[in-house]
Amino acid sequence: QTIYGASIPADIAMDKKSEVLLAYKMNEEPIPADHGYPIRAVVPGIVGARNVKWVGKIIASDKESDSHWQQNDYKGFNSSIDWHNVDFTTAPAIQELPVISAICSARVEGDEVVAQG
């Protein structure tokens, strides 16, 4: 059995402004299994791969997780990278993710949904 592992920088995890959560409920109910029961990490502003589902253990460390996914996946590369001989150890793990959505309100007018904002 392969165990998923990921890490986020300690300064983000400990910063109250980051609003990092260990969620055990969703909409006042125990968090469903497909969303991470019994515990899920929720790290706003960080790539989804670091919002770990089914948390079984948390380790405080001064180094990045040595898990396969932290070291060999979810890395940031220049668009001109030669994928035939890429060295994943030279690239930083993707952490921050800018907001790529918008929040708006909508109303129904006849057969159409009209977005506002």
Image (cartoon, grey):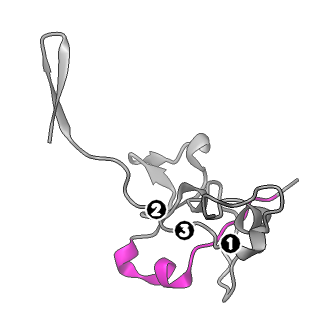
Residue at 34 percent across and 47 percent down: it is 101
Crowd class of label 2 (few under 14; some 14 to 19; many from 20; radius 10 Å):
few
Going by the picture, which residue comes out furthest to the bottom? 62
Q: Which residues are magenta?
A: 3-18
Left-right relation of 73 to 22: right
Query: Viewer-proximal residue, 111 or 92?
Result: 92
Q: Helix, strand, or loop for circle 3? A: loop
Q: Nearer the viewer, mark 1 or mark 3?
A: 1
Disc 1 or disc 2, which is closer to the eye?
1
- List x then y, in percent, for residue 65: 72, 75
Q: Are marks 2 and 3 in contact (CB under 8 Å)?
A: yes
Q: Which mark is residue 95?
A: 3
Check the picture and name the quadrant holding the C terminus.
Answer: top left
Earlier along the polypeptide chain: callout 1 or callout 2? 1
CA separation, marks 1 and 2?
16 Å
Residue 103 inside the magenta-drawn segment = no
| Vertical comparison of 41 with 17: above or below | above
Callout 2, which amino acid? Leu
Q: Quadrant of residue 45?
A: bottom left
The tag on residue 97 is 2
Residue that sits furthest to the top in the current view: 111
Q: Amino acid at mark 3?
A: Gln
SS at mark 2 in the image = loop
Res 113 quadrant in image: top left
The residue to which callout 1 is attached is 91
In the image, farthest residue toward the left: 109
Disc 3 crowd rating (10 Å Cα; few below 14, some 14-19, many 20+) is some
- Left or right, 23 with respect to 34, comes to left
Which residue is depicted at the point 82% across and 56% down? 84
CA gap between label 1 and label 3 equals 12 Å
